[in-house]
Each structure stands twice: as C-alpha cells, then as structure tokens.
Amino acid sequence: MNCREFTEFLHEYLFGDLPVGERAEFEMHLAECPWCVAYLDSYQATLQLVQVARTAEDDVSPTDAPEELVRAILRARPRIS
Amino acid sequence: MAPARPSAPVLDEATLLARMQAGDDEAFEACVRTYCGRLLVVARRILPNEEDARDAVQDAFLAAFKQIDRFEERSKLGTWLHRIGVNAALGRLRKLHKHPEQPIESLLPHFGEGEHQFDPPAPWQATSDAILQGKESRELVTRCINRLPDAYRTVVLLRDIEGIDTDETARLLGTSPGVIKTRLHRARQALRTLLDPYFRRDDL
C-alpha cells in the first residue's frame, strides 16, 4: 500500500468497512509512514471539530424565530374549508 | 427588558397533531412557534442569504400543513418537519445554482514520486477539549464548511451537522448511497486541508 491508496481507503478503515486483508496492509503502511500517521490523526481531529460545531448548533430555542416570519407563515396558511 | 413575545399554548405532540388535523388555528400557531427557529437554523446553513432561508422555511411549513392529514406517527413531528425543511432549502439551493459544479480537486491531497504527498502532512496541535469547544474554532469550522463546493458542502451538512443517514441523504440529494459516501470522504479531506494551516505544527 502507498500513501495515495492510504488516503483513498482511510474512510473505510475508520468506519470498519475494510476487509481483513486490506486492513492488515493498511496497518502495515501506518507502522512505517509517519506522514500517513499525521494525516490519519488530523483527519480524525477534523471529524471531531465538525462534531463540536454540530452540538454547539443544536441548542436553538423556539424564541429564535423572527416574529415577522412566524406571522407570514400563519397568514399564508390555507384554511380548511 | 425585551418585550414579551406572543405565546401559543404548549401542547404535547399527539394533541398538537390531532388539533392541527382538525384545522385548529391555535395549534398551527403553536407548531410554527415551536419549530420555526430550528428550521431557520437549518435553512441558513444550506442557503447563502437570509431572504432565501426564510422563504425556504415558509415553503416547508406550507408543504407540511398541506400534508398534515397524511402524517403518521411513525416519526416524530419535529423529525418530519426537519426533513421537509431540509428538502425545501435544497430545492431553493438547486434553483440558485444553475452553473456547473465547482471542482474539489485543489483541496484534496496531491501525490508525487513514490506516491508520497507533495505537501507532507505535519502533526496538528493537540485539539484539546478547550480548543475544540472554543467559539473561535466552531466559527472556523463553519467558515471552512461554507468554502466547500456545494455538492460536497451539502453532504457534510446533511450527514455530519443534521445527522441524516447515508440512504436518506442520497434520497434528498437525488443520488446513490455510494456517491454520498465518496463525497463525504472527499469533503472531509477538503475540510482537513482548509483547517490544516490553523492547526498544523511545523516545529517538529
């Protein structure tokens, strides 16, 4: 396995989708290539950073809705006759 | 002190739904007041400007109200509205971007002799909890996500931020789960490239 293949299959490796044989090759490459170790670590850190951005945005209260938008939606709602 | 906002009664989901299905105005208002803020956050992430985001939220509620008789309690009302909101925002985004898709290649790793990367990856600073939780790094990540080409940005938003699974993301974007998996990996690689200058340690 070379560095190009390593970066291609990284996703499958991290999410357990690599067959056993390829997983062993992947780990052999990792044992001898400090650049790919750094790449793997920074890729995982990226995933962590995105997750933090996600949880931070989860905290939205209903009062964050602009009143004029609420009114516009209610005005535009067709009434059941 | 901020002026009090008009309020609608807080109803449990089954009561709210039954009253909306019976055409009760107060229940529709309670529904809009409960979910409008969350749908607006989603639409603002997907669309480039506030006006389009608000229009998408309005489209979403009107589409949902039209189908309210057909809503079955297999999913939660909030989850159902969230998906309709995502779909409405994606629909507006498709109308806005008729030009060819931007390439992502410049943000992916490049390889030279021996298939090593041209720009050898360097270790990052420890992204300790304090750094990760900081407002600055959250804003940085959001800015970097917004720099991705739309076909990749939408996949990161739907999968990683909105928490929608691969199959449903594929359905919402009109493509296959395999394409979504490939795009997600490329999008994450591109994000790593964009974040690299802020976190890499060149002192080693």
Image: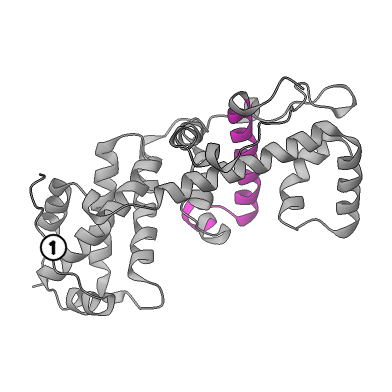
Categorize mark 1 by other alpha carbons within 10 Å: few (<14), some (14-19), many (20+): few
Q: Main secondary structure of the magenta part?
A: helix
Image quarter of residue B62: bottom left
- Looking at the rendering, the stretch of residues picked out in magenta corresponds to B170-196
Q: Nearer the viewer, residue B33 or A4?
A: B33
Label 1 marks a residue whose chain is: A
Residue drawn at 10 percent across, 68 percent down: B25
Image coordinates of residue B198 in percent, x first then y, are 58, 25
The residue that appears at 15% across and 63% down in the rendered structure is: B29
Quarter of the image with the N terminus of chain B in it: top left
Which residue position is annotated with label 1? A78
Quadrant assignment for the C terminus of chain B:
top right
- For the question of whether residue B152 can be seen, the reply is no
Horizontal side, residue A72 vs residue B51: left or right: left
Q: Is residue B15 above or below residue B35?
A: below
Compared with B74, B47 (above or below) is above
Left or right for B179, reference A74: right
Numbered disc 1: secondary structure: loop
Residue sitting at the far front: B130
Image position, residue B17 (x, y; %): 24, 75
Q: Nearer the viewer, residue B35 or B48?
A: B35
Lateral position of residue B175 relative to residue B8, left or right: right
Q: Amino acid at mark 1?
A: Pro
In the picture provided, is A63 more to the left or to the right than B7?
Answer: right
Q: Position of residue A31 (x, y in %)?
A: 90, 41
Q: Position of residue B123 (x, y in %)?
A: 73, 30
